[in-house]
Image (cartoon, coloured by chain):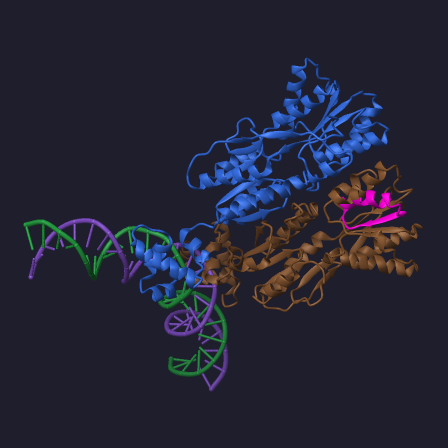
Chain colours: A brown, B blue, C green, D purple
Amino acid sequence: MEELAKVAGVSVSTVSRALAGNPLINAKTRARITDLAAKHNYQINENARNFRLQKTNVIAVVLMLDAKSEQHTSDMFFLEMLGAIADALSVQNYDLLLVNSPMTNVLDIHNSRIFRQSDGIIFIGQGNQHDHLNTFYELEKPMVVWGSNLPDRRYCTVGADNVVGGYLSTKHLLNLGRKDIVFMGDINMPEPKQRFEGYLKALKEKSIRFDKHLQIDVPFEMSHASEAINDLLQQNVSFDGAVCCSDLIALSAISALTESGLRIPEDVAVVGYDDIALASYSSPSLTTVRQNIVQGGRILVQKLMAQINGDTVTDSVLKTELIVRRSSGAW
Amino acid sequence: MEELAKVAGVSVSTVSRALAGNPLINAKTRARITDLAAKHNYQINENARNFRLQKTNVIAVVLMLDAKSEQHTSDMFFLEMLGAIADALSVQNYDLLLVNSPMTNVLDIHNSRIFRQSDGIIFIGQGNQHDHLNTFYELEKPMVVWGSNLPDRRYCTVGADNVVGGYLSTKHLLNLGRKDIVFMGDINMPEPKQRFEGYLKALKEKSIRFDKHLQIDVPFEMSHASEAINDLLQQNVSFDGAVCCSDLIALSAISALTESGLRIPEDVAVVGYDDIALASYSSPSLTTVRQNIVQGGRILVQKLMAQINGDTVTDSVLKTELIVRRSSGAW
DNA sequence: TGGATAAATACAAACGATTGCATTCAGCAG
DNA sequence: CTGCTGAATGCAATCGTTTGTATTTATCCA
């Protein structure tokens, strides 16, 4: 910048202001300086800039993976979300610091490099750490959480509309004439819980009474879904539809059902959640609920930037849509 | 640090040296200072430090996603690799700057923030940019590439042993008595090409002549694998085994075969690649080739650190193993 | 033309660490 | 007691920006 000032015949401060678009500087000089900067391929030293401005230009993204579930939770979901956030951040000239190690307690972050070395934090998921997140919020570090609107929540969340998601998929099956619909998802977790709400709402609209045997706590990853289905079949619980909290659960259920000789969707219609790539290519292809992940990432970033600028922010609930495919969920 | 110097009754430079473990400083003073630092919960300003040292402490990780293939390339593979790298970097106190936007030309990086704002770059995959990567290497930026040992390569690579991977999976099928084995993978891409080499090697060992109709260029993502299988069936090409370059291809092939009334693995035995989570849970569960991704990430980081420290580094080829599961690949 | 006012630019001090060189101090030999 | 030596510590410059304040230059009206 010093050299640039020399060739432009002005002082460093003028160059600095010119490049920053400061109105103090005469429009003509500013134009001249920016031209020169371009010609000489001047690149600002972001390090010095950040140092001076006391900011890091880094946003930490914490994947709230469950240590128990072998990190597989929703698979593609994390990568897609990460990509969406990375894109949105790079537009704003922010870097993404990825925090991958399983967090048993988010408060540990307070004394870590993650805290000092970032201007804000995005948590992807709430895990079971709602209370810790609430405490974390008091540290006054800009933060935003992808998740659902839990009661007594102080931090800002962005999330898909899980109630609607559950409602739409259940209603889809009901409209197809299905009566006994299994709900597969762990309602102790925030998001499945809200989808279950939607499920109940759809049943109620059709005046169908909920049979508590039809709700099964399966984790997002798929390993236990097959067993759960087999248990149901053994107990002679009869059902003709299944609303699943992830595509993996759905695929696993379908495979268990098929192995038991049931036809999909004639005997049991199945609906998934997430619309992972596999959903459309699997056979039978899967009717599922899509969350707009790209939009989600963009809004997460936008809310965080607002906080960094000192604005107060409100929660955001994204539209959620049902993707109807021919085979598994009938049509 | 200034305050710390005050309470310790020494100068800032002494504190700096003490904390850096500089032997100029008396062991006793050093101990006293580090104790005080801990007690007062002193955290160094990495920003200032990096500024002074002219380094960023950031490593850029470039996902070489193919723009055409809708970024789905190998799905879980990227996330797992990313996680492994993030873990390895955080041990070294480095941040990970994620570069997600599809790269049509890696040389564009030279004039971007990614270049200035990082101490080194990890490319995950080579895409079809081998030559550009070679040119990039001349820029003298520390770099390392996850990929295969292409001819005329100047940059350093770390990769799984694709020849062995192709060899093992083919041999597995041959040992089960299969004779006509389809190879599904685009041999214009570096990695499938090497796997194909291994495939040929295994055939040769059993003195089986390769029929060129049995090799099909399908991209990693799965959409075209079903069609390819259907084409084969229509052309009455007979085969009793399939070596696939990704699990997604394998799953897609299985579903196409099943729909055509063929039994897996009785009529056709299928082997995948990658060992994605779905491979073990799908039905039939998938015999596949596993690359040690965690180790891969660790070695990538290690090689890059060596380069940053001015050492010269050599390539690295990781062990690759076959995961045999009961159903799809027979046993 | 002079002087007040406004616009444009320059000066210089920060930001928080590192590091070459100067300085202090203790120990010791002459 | 002086002078020398080496170990331990302090001084001060430096990295490349930004920004409050001082200064210069231009503008305009009486």
Left or right side of B290 for A260 = right
The quadrant the N terminus of chain B occupies is bottom left
User: Is A231 colored magenta in this rendering?
Assistant: yes
Q: Nearer the viewer, residue B211 or A272?
A: A272
Query: Looking at the image, which residue sits at the far top?
Result: B207
User: Is A294 colored magenta in this rendering?
Assistant: no
Q: Is residue B260 above or below residue B73?
A: above
Q: Is residue C15 above or below residue B294?
A: below
Q: Nearer the viewer, residue A217 or C10?
A: A217
Left or right side of B9 for A275 = right
Q: Residue at x 52, y 29 (%)?
A: B153
Residue B105 visible in image = yes
Residue B142 visible in image = no
**Residue B292 occupies which quadrant of the picture?**
top right
* Residue D23 at x, y percent in the picture: 37, 72
Count of numbered circles in the view: 0
Left or right side of B168 for B256 = right
* Residue B215 at x, y percent in the picture: 72, 23
- Extent of the magenta region: A228-250
**Residue B271 occupies which quadrant of the picture?**
top right
* Residue B189 at x, y percent in the picture: 64, 30
Left or right side of B76 for B106 = left
Q: Nearer the viewer, residue A208 or A281?
A: A208
Q: Residue at x 55, y 49 (%)?
A: B97
* Residue A174 at x, y percent in the picture: 90, 53
Q: Nearer the viewer, residue B235 or D1?
A: D1
Q: Residue at x 51, y 60 (%)?
A: A55
**Residue B109 occupies which quadrant of the picture?**
top right
The quadrant the C terminus of chain B occupies is top right
